[in-house]
Image (spheres, rainbow, N blue to C red):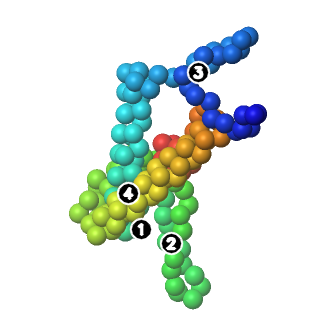
Amino acid sequence: MAPAPFAPASPRQPPGKGEKEKKQIIRRNGVIQAIRLGVGEVTEFLDALAAFYEALPKHLRPGYYQLHRADGSTFWVKRWNPSVRQRAEAVYRHFDQLNLTSVWQNVLANEIEDRLIGSASRRAGEQARRIGLSRGLQFGPWDTFYSGLI
């Protein structure tokens, strides 16, 4: 009987004859763990800063401008993305004008988003291992993570 075409490979099987052994990253490596912890802390800081920044009134956020229509009405336009430093300065300067209800709503929404992304990522990894891939499938809002660092 022939093996299934997508049978998952066991990570503990020795390589076949004439086959080169694949190296895998050791998950318990202290340096790798420290890097992962550091990246996680930076991400959590950026998430918390975003929760506070989004709770500021728009007229206090850098990058937003109020425009006026001919009929006298006004609207807000986001012209540019402020840097992390500009966001932190805006929160620090206008901390007394934060809407604390909005801060908690933003934190809760971010927590729900993180859990959904984590769940989808775990399931994608399980599926990848099920079909025989050595690594999981990457999933996440990386564009928002990196845009916050610029």
Q: Is residue 66 above or below residue 136?
A: below
Q: Which residue is mark 1?
A: 58
SS of the residue under disc 2: strand
Q: Are marks 2 and 1 in contact (CB under 8 Å)?
A: yes
Of the residues under marks 2 and 3, which one precedes in the sequence?
3
Q: Is residue 10 visible?
A: yes
Q: Amino acid at mark 1?
A: Lys
Q: CA distance from mark 4 to mark 1?
A: 23 Å
Amino acid found under the numbered disc labelled 3: Gln
Q: Measuring from the top left, give residue 16's x and y in whole percent.
A: 69, 16
Q: CA distance from mark 2 to mark 4?
A: 27 Å
**Neighbour class for label 4 at 10 Å: few (<14), some, many (≥20)?**
few
Disc 3 is placed on an element classified as loop
Q: Amino acid at mark 2?
A: Trp
- Does 63 sit left or right of 131 as displayed? left
Mark 3 residue crowding within 10 angstroms, few (<14) / some (14–19) / many (20+): few
When asked about the image quadrant of residue 110, the answer is bottom left
Residue at which label 2 appears: 76
Give the left or right position of residue 132, taking residue 55 as reference.
right
Of pointers 4 and 1, the one earlier in the residue sequence: 1
Residue topped by disc 3: 13
Q: Quadrant of the N terminus?
A: top right
Res 110 visible: no
Disc 4 marks which residue? 111
Q: Nearer the viewer, mark 2 or mark 3?
A: 3
